[in-house]
Amino acid sequence: MALLISSFPGLSSAATGVALHHLLFRQGEWDSSAPTLLSSYVVIFAGLNVLKLGAPEFQNLNTYYVLACHLLGLFSSIIVYRMLFHRLRKFPGPVLAGITSWYANCLSAKKLHKFEEIGRLHRQYGDYVRVGPRELSIANPRALPIIYGHASQTTKGPFYDGAKPYISVHSTRDKRDHARRRKMWDRAFSSKSLRDYEQRVSRYAAQLLSVIADNVGKPIDMSRWFNYYSFDVIGDLIFGKSFDMLITGKDAYMLKTLHKDMQSMGPFLHSMWILEIFKLIPGLNSSLLVYFEWVKEQIENRMKNEPENPDIFTQLEADFRNTKQSKKDQLHFHGEVNVGLVAGSDSTASTLTNLFYELANAPEFTCLLQAEIDSVKERTYQELSQMQLLNAAIDETMRLHPAIPSGMQRLTSQKGVMIDDVYIPGNCLVQIPLYSIFRDERSFAQPNEFIPQRWTDRPDLVKDPSAYAPFGLGPFACAGRQLAYMEIRRITTELLSRYDISLAKDQTREAFYEGQRDSFTVVCGKLQLEFTERGTVKV
């Protein structure tokens, strides 16, 4: 063997690359092992240089040449296999997409408007588009229950491993573990719990109303203030205290860090191995380390200050108390708290921002909605939940502007999946772009128009109700959707009962859409609105 390597270093090195691909890398998932693989290459390269010093037959060996030939063999084998022999080779899509996941990363990096780029590919190639070496984007509305529903045989893909070691109900890929964790979240969002949260939500709605009152008739960036509102609410419900952004008018550490990190990680969500390496590199991982140290400090403070009324943290902590409370359990607990902070704030803020953008552009419907609001005697959680036009406006907003526009990643089972007459092979990654699905003419008439009445007295505009699932379907559906509805209904009714709304003079449709960022969840840019007092105010 030594003679072969020393005699034909380039050929033998290339052969090791080909063998490594077929015997190892084609089997299983390797994203989480990226740091180990990189370290192994460094050790082997160093070992070859040491070997040169101790073995005469290797003294003339050019280790850089050997490494280059090995990588050439490895990547050549990968490219040929993905183009000519891969199980997804028959699905249409850009050639580069079938070769490397960097194609999808580049789509994400392009203004962080991945949902638009994916939509463009579907218009070009059809319902099934290969967007990665083993990844399909599926824009067939009938695929929603098959991929995401209760009876689905798919599981979460490697994207969710990016949260390690802070595993939560959102990131766990084990269905039994998810079911166990989901129970505590369901308790946290039970009807009784929501009634207990109502007064606290109203407190922050009142703070936001105070801000609006100080800016009547002036342009105000409501995207910013809706973020403050939703983050202050979730801070109270998890840590027992507000982030005080509605009071100070300044971004808290949590908000600044979340949006900064989401935008920096957004372009790499199709190559999770990159994030695994970044998390271990000093300097590059500093933001992540500091952030979770902050989460830890907030948790410790909350444990020392138990509120009178139970909240979300109460349920999370109760579940943690029932574990061994090992280091691993602690990290998972921190993960649960973190996912509550993120999921319970960002999506609500973006939905509120998009809702008020649509209402400002639909004054006739907004007048109808204000009349419905005026007719409600007591604005309790129960009363607001029964308002038809309000619920229709929220649903229509989430149809046009889903919080997760590019969909959730799933891994098909070994036997694959049938969608109509199309077979999706096993062990493939699939995503359903909700932005495209919810605007599909096969399911919704006039799909790009804001028509809330399609959910009330215009059912003819909804051709296929099953194609609408803004909070997901099946066991992985969002547990906190009723809290989100509560926050949205509360501040919407309080604002519209007092004010008429309009776009500020300099706010354009183009600027609003240009400001949106798809980093798994949508982060909205500026929305400049003007509020003017109504002729009569319902108290």
Image (cartoon, rainbow, N blue to C red):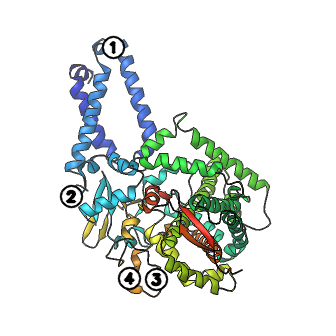
Instruction: Using the image, determine if residue 160 lies above or below residue 210.
Output: above
Q: Please, what secondary structure does the residue beneath circle 1 have?
A: loop
Q: Is residue 414 visible?
A: no
Left or right: residue 365 versus residue 482 is left
User: Nearest the camera: 19 or 469?
Assistant: 469
Q: Which of the 4 image quadrants contains residue 169?
A: bottom right
Residue drawn at (43%, 72%) of the image: 149
Residue 146, x across and y down, in percent: 37, 71
Sequence-first tag of 3 and 1:
1
Q: Amino acid at mark 3?
A: Gln
Residue 358, x across and y down, in percent: 49, 70
Q: Amino acid at mark 4?
A: Leu
Sequence-first tag of 3 and 4:
3
Instruction: Using the image, determine if residue 142 lies above or below residue 114.
Output: below
Q: Amino acid at mark 2?
A: Lys
Sequence-first tag of 2 and 4:
2
Quickly name the residue at label 1: 55
Sequence-first tag of 2 and 1:
1
Quickly name the residue at label 3: 453
Residue drawn at (47%, 75%) of the image: 396
User: Nearest the camera: 479 or 523?
Assistant: 523
Q: Which mark is residue 475?
A: none
Quickly name the residue at label 2: 90
